[in-house]
Image: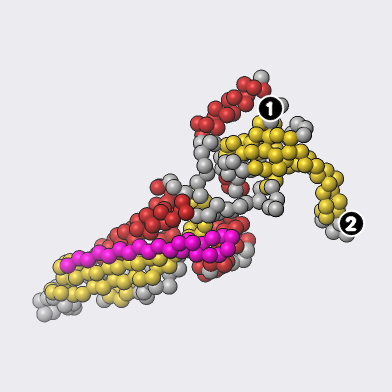
Amino acid sequence: MRVVVWSTILALAAVSGWGQSPKKRVAVFDFDNAAVQGGMKLPFVEMSAPNLGKAAADLLITKLVQDGNVSVIERNAIDKLLAEQNLTNSDRTDPVTAAKLGKVLGVDAIILGTITHYDYADKTTGGGGARFGGFGGSSMKTKHDIDAKVQISTRLVSPDTAEVLAVSQGAGEVKRKGVKMDIRDTSQISVMGGNANNPLMNECMDNAIAQLATQLEQAFPKLPLRTSLIDGLVADANESGHLVLNVGAHDGVKLGDRLQVWRAGKEIRDPASGKVLLRDDTLLGEAVVTGVNDISSIAQYRGTEPVKVRDLVKSIPKQ
């Protein structure tokens, strides 16, 4: 019966992608919004400057997820970690701080971004000026030449060293000539300045993000393999040495990894604090990882005696 069960597990593993190399994992932090200009003033209307840092990061996350070349950490996990570490949004832009957060998140790289240029130029080229009460016979309809520009740069940062591994830059520009507008028509306000709902600025942003994603995806395969410290448990084992482990790609496990298998022994604790000082564990042997998914893995064991559920699996110490 055990043979049938394990054959079923291995068949499911092949279908679900256990035999494939896990994707690189990245975290996208909110972009620096410093270059965004202040609000734009029009007759009877004042618009505040848009907060595009989060919007740009969201667009990049969506694009990377759609392309499917990397695994992207949920934003909620980053926000929760920031709260736990008592850090502000501004701390995200610091490579050293970001690297520390990335190490806790277990990612292969952190993407930091900056909106380096954000500009909306609106030049009136014709039409009547604003008149009140109809005096002068001129309407409030005007023609405009519009030039919208967005430029964004990103840095791919190592969570191990805080080193900038790659940089990329995306730019978007849209020009429109002779655009007719009537400032009394509130439906046109979204194209009369740099507000967050401006379709021209959004088009620029989309173009810039598409360029960034293309450049980043060329850099992802070159990311160095991270050496993660694995510390897990055996969830199931059979007589032939097939093991199911409770650690997977999210814990840094990769195909071909060699892990040590230990039998937990006596714990020696500090009598004052209760903290474990030493453990008298017994090394049983090694296991080679043959299949990985996000939260678990399969390994083939060779050692001195059979493995039991709850035996320990650990990374092999560096010499």
Say whether residue 129 is visible: yes
Residue at the front extreme of this rendering:
319
Give the x, y percent position of residue 221: 46, 51
Above or below, 279 against 35 in this view is above
Residue at the left extreme of this rendering:
137
Give the x, y percent position of residue 130: 18, 77
Please tell me the numbered disc located at residue 240. 1
Residue 254 found in image quarter: top right
Q: Is residue 89 left or right of residue 1?
A: left
Residue designated by label 2: 271
Q: Is residue 276 left or right of residue 100?
A: right
Above or below, 15 against 182 in this view is above
Give the x, y percent position of residue 206: 33, 58
Q: Is residue 277 left or right of residue 191?
A: right
> Do labels 1 and 2 touch, CB within 8 Å?
no
Element on which disc 2 rests: loop
Q: Is residue 176 left or right of residue 275?
A: left
User: Along the polypeptide, which appears first: circle 1 or circle 2?
Assistant: 1
Residue at the bottom extreme of this rendering:
136
The three-letter amino acid code for the residue at tag 2 is Pro
Above or below, 98 against 310 in this view is below
- Which residues fall within the magenta stretch? 155-177
> Residue at the location (60% across, 48% down)?
252
Does the stretch in magenta take in 159? yes
Magenta span: chief secondary structure? strand
Element on which disc 1 rests: loop
Q: Looking at this view, is 100 or 191 the one in front?
A: 100
> Residue at the location (45% across, 68% down)?
32
Which of label 1 and label 2 is nearer to you? 1
Does the stretch in magenta take in 138? no
> How far is the residue under mark 1 from the one under mark 2?
42 Å
The three-letter amino acid code for the residue at tag 1 is Ser
